[in-house]
Amino acid sequence: GENVEQHPSTLSVQEGDSAVIKCTYSDSASNYFPWYKQELGKRPQLIIDIRSNVGEKKDQRIAVTLNKTAKHFSLHITETQPEDSAVYFCAASAPGYALNFGKGTSLLVTP
Amino acid sequence: DAGITQSPRHKVTETGTPVTLRCHQTENHRYMYWYRQDPGHGLRLIHYSYGVKDTDKGEVSDGYSVSRSKTEDFLLTLESATSSQTSVYFCAISEILAGRYNEQFFGPGTRLTVL
């Protein structure tokens, strides 16, 4: 089955800096790669996703890149703000299969 | 938030007792999932359903069973709860249209403590 590895497990940045979280996946058939943000005590919520037919997608301060050959994808957050502090999860799925999640990255943005 | 509710939201029970958690959706989505979330483990899939009466096991299904008799309800049962099943349980729903996976929406979660 699919195995998703996520790094780093914790990340601390200064407000205004960029943050990058990286994930690798094992199943070359995976074609859907969402990223979820989970604030303390809340449910995970989708912030951005990418499908295997594109290499990059941006939405304001967040972007995701996908390298299908290397089987890795990354989340980039620019101009970080304290409200970006949360746990971020990457996930991957092949057609017809459930999402497999990484173990999460706890991001702390300090003022 | 998508129309997903979970009940109960909090439960404390004793080892060996049966426990049933309920997930209810109003989105008419075909796919429903149960995850557990534990520190250091992320979200792990317990069971999922791809239609009424159609279910399958996930990564950590031992000790859990599920049922789906209606599109809107997906029940997770711990037949005999153990302390290792203390966790936060999330239900999720999604739809797959034209072979394309669409966004998975999560419920608010149920915090279960087994003493």
Image (cartoon, rainbow, N blue to C red):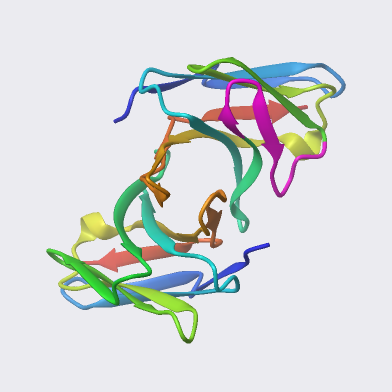
Judged from this view, the residue extending furthest toward the bottom is A70
Describe residue B115's horizontal placement relative to residue B109 as left or right.
right
Q: Position of residue B60 (x, y in %)?
A: 74, 45
Inspect the magenta stretch and tell me whether residue A52 lies in it: no
**Foreground of the two, A4 or A110:** A4
State whether residue A39 appears in this view.
no
Describe residue B4's horizontal placement relative to residue B112 as left or right.
left
| Residue appearing at x 59%, y 40% in the figure | B35
Q: Position of residue B75 (x, y in %)?
A: 63, 20
Q: Position of residue B78 (x, y in %)?
A: 76, 25
In the image, residue B75 above or below residue B38:
above
| Residue appearing at x 82%, y 39% in the figure | B62
Judged from this view, the residue extending furthest toward the left is A60
What segment is highlighted magenta in the picture? B49-62
Image quarter in which the C terminus of chain A is found? bottom left
In the image, residue B12 above or below residue B41:
above
Judged from this view, the residue extending furthest toward the top is B70
| Residue appearing at x 54%, y 62% in the figure | A102
Describe residue A39's horizontal placement relative to residue A97 as left or right.
left
Q: Position of residue B57 (x, y in %)?
A: 72, 40
In the image, residue A11 above or below residue B59:
below
Describe residue B29's horizontal placement relative to residue B69 as left or right.
left
Image quarter in which the N terminus of chain A is found? bottom right
**Foreground of the two, B35 or A69:** A69
**Foreground of the two, A24 or A54:** A54
